Amino acid sequence: GDHEVAARGARVRYRDALASGNRGPMPDKITLEVFRYRPDQEQRPTSQSYEVPYQEDWVVLDALNWIKDQQDGTLSYRWSCRMGVCGSCGMMVNGVPKLTCSAFLRDLLPGPIKVEPLSGFPVERDLVVVLDDFMQKLVDVKPWIIREVEQPVEQGEYRQTPGQLVDFKQYSMCINCALCYAACPVLASDPDFVGPAAIALGHRYNLDSRDEGNAERFETFNSHDGVYACSFANECSQVCPKHVDPAMAIQQAKLNDFMQWAKILPKKNFT
Ligand code: FES
């Protein structure tokens, strides 16, 4: 009867309120202010406004894809997996480094939403940044298992207990999205700083029970732009979409580095 109809109405209103995050009526459209830079056509970057349909379940990347498909095929940006795995869709969203495939429009209402390339990186075109320096830093920490003497293949693989895996697993979850580089205040003033993701990655190998490469990574870690350049602002850990906690990795790496230094010191000075 009436009671049932009223209850159904309340349920529908409740569901709608949940769906809209209790933010009132949903808009039809939302505006994106997108950073544009086409080095072949213009001297300096500009900002371009696009009005896109608002969809409850859309993320910023969906809006960019809609722009590219429906409004402006010249817009350039990177993406691949659309599920927070590949790490290629990082951009500044309202000034904060984010994976655009995980940044829901509904959390950015009412707009406009400012979309810019990751800060701190040279811009190749529009929202695409040059990552060469970042990639080189990842290589510099030698992110592979280093052995003093390789065990013969017939002896099988290097075994590891679940406990030994836990020691470094968190630091192996990085997807190289570089959001932490865009967030790091040290990198903003010292671009040569090895940086959060690369230090966390090197530290991951230093912690690996199968690895014997601590001394080989020492030079990079202990350099002027190594672990001690970190001021522990913790911004990197706050923006990390995978909860790698690179700031913690760097603090541990400092301690580890100090112990390496203590090991090396007597050899250097007294032999
Ligand atoms: Fe792969 Fe966003 S598209 S992480």
Image (cartoon, grey):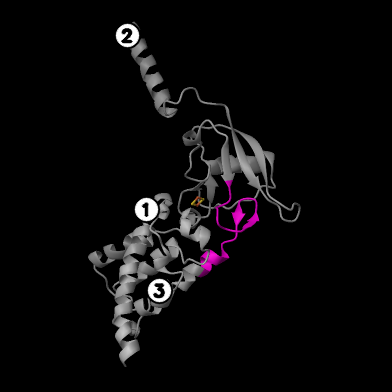
For label 2, the residue is: 3
Sequence-wise first label, 3 or 1? 3
For label 1, the residue is: 243
Residue at x 32%, y 73% (from the top left corner): 258
Local crowd size for mark 3, using a 10 Å CA cut-off: few (<14), some (14–19), many (≥20): some
* Amino acid type for the residue under numbered disc 1: His
Query: Within 8 Å of ligand 1, the CB of disc 1?
Result: no
**Closer to us: mark 2 or mark 1?**
1
The residues colored magenta run: 116-136
**Closer to us: mark 3 or mark 1?**
3
Sequence-wise first label, 3 or 2? 2
Indicate whether residue 122 is drawn in magenta.
Answer: yes
Helix, strand or loop status at disc 3: helix
Residue at x 40%, y 50% (from the top left corner): 238
* Amino acid type for the residue under numbered disc 2: His
* Amino acid type for the residue under numbered disc 3: Asn
CB contact under 8 Å: marks 3 and 1:
no
Helix, strand or loop status at disc 1: loop
Q: Is residue 103 left or right of residue 30?
A: left
Residue 115 percent across, percent down from the top left: 58, 44
Residue 230 percent across, percent down from the top left: 41, 62
Q: Quadrant of the C terminus?
A: bottom left
For label 3, the residue is: 222
Local crowd size for mark 1, using a 10 Å CA cut-off: few (<14), some (14–19), many (≥20): some
Sequence-wise first label, 2 or 1? 2
Do we see residue 157 in this rendering?
no
Q: Viewer-proximal residue, 62 or 44?
A: 44
As measured in the structure, the alpha-carbon distance from the residue carrying label 3 to the one carrying label 2 is 72 Å
As measured in the structure, the alpha-carbon distance from the residue carrying label 3 to the one carrying label 1 is 25 Å
